[in-house]
Amino acid sequence: MGNDPADQNDNVAAITLGTGLDLYARARLDHQRTGRTTERDLRRDFKALLSRPVSIITTPMLASIIDTKAQTAPTMANRLLGYAGPWFRWMTARGHCVQNPIRGIEKPAQEQSRERVLKAEELAAIWDAAPKLGYPFGPFVQLLLLTGVRREEMAGMKFDEIDFDAALWTVPASRSKTGVAIRIPLNHRTLEVLKQIPTTNSVFVFSTTGKAPVSGFSKMKKKLDRLSGICDWRLHDFRRTMVSAMVDLGIDATTADRCLNHTGASTMSTVQRIYQRSDLLDARRRAMDAWENWVTPLIQSNQGSVTE
């Protein structure tokens, strides 16, 4: 009888899946840079199971949710599986599960590396459409195009991180994907866009509530696609487009890669990464100026305010 699963279930710490997520979030996710996003996605996608006891959650239940997600969002389904694995391992280790039900579930989708580089006319169309989004998304999109920074880093930008005199934006380690503070050189046109953004009582440059960073990117992106006529692209493609143009302009690959705020450029050897302590600020500033000079003729057609 000691091996009877029913008997084992009687001995586990009886909590609901939702309570298990609460405990996991406080113990682990609250201390992770992307923990809030992970918790949000887990709550959203496993909502139907949150009121059920953890002890009755089975592999088929979890697989069904992940496979359903994969039908419309395969990459997100893979990510969901990646989020759920540590969560269920944590609950199993603390006696909330007899066995880990997520174990054995394979990735539902084969991901392919994106190679989308936006064409000059596509960049122009997106730039021209951005002001029609109004604040905060108009300048938000334009600054992503001009700087090539990550979406979440731009969304969390604070006014006190910007040094207009030095033309620098410092992203603190707590918000940087790499966990290392980064200095981003701001070119002339980037500063122009920033100076048009209205100052409020909020610490955030981009916010709809004044209390939190801007969000709602999916809805914004659909509207931007409709206004620009450009589809099948992602905000992240600005980064690939910028670095590709830099290399074409003669910027060395290491500097171009560091403009994407990678702490160790992919073009460096292991030894080079260990001994490369400089953030190449001057070289990156020259590279960002070259990118601005290349992109400026494409966007000259729109001189309107991006904050309307």
Image (spheres, helix red, strand yellow):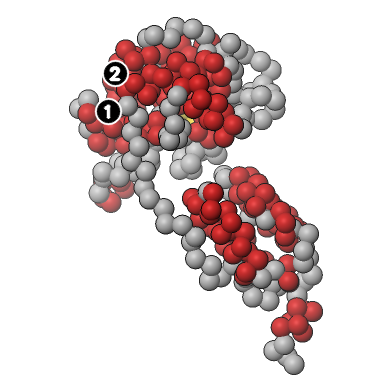
- Mark 1 and mark 2 lie on one chain; the one further toward the N terminus is 1
Residue 4 position, x and y percent, is 72, 87
Residue nearest the observer in this picture, 266 or 246:
246
Q: Secondary structure at mark 1?
A: helix
Residue at the top extreme of this rendering: 303
Residue 280 position, x and y percent, is 31, 31
Residue 201 position, x and y percent, is 69, 17
Which labelled disc corresponds to residue 246?
1
Q: For residue 94, say whether it is visible.
A: no
Residue nearest the observer in this picture, 36 or 72:
72
Q: Residue at x 30, y 45 (%)?
A: 266
Number of marks present in the image shown: 2
The reply, left or right, for residue 20 in relation to residue 74 is right
Q: Residue at x 65, y 46 (%)?
A: 40
Position of 159 relative to 57 (above/below): above
Quarter in which the N terminus is drawn:
bottom right
Q: Secondary structure at mark 2?
A: helix
Residue at the bottom extreme of this rendering: 1
Q: Quadrant of residue 122?
A: top left
Q: For residue 112, say whether it is visible.
A: yes
- Give the CA separation, mark 1 to mark 2: 9 Å
Residue at the left extreme of this rendering: 250
Residue nearest the observer in this picture, 145 or 115:
115
Residue 247 position, x and y percent, is 24, 31
Q: Residue at x 45, y 24 (%)?
A: 229
The reply, left or right, for residue 112 in relation to residue 251 is right
Q: Tell me the amino acid under the disc marked 2.
A: Trp
Which labelled disc corresponds to residue 294?
2
Q: Tell me the amino acid under the disc marked 1.
A: Met
Q: Residue at x 29, y 24 (%)?
A: 287
Position of 257 relative to 96 (above/below): above
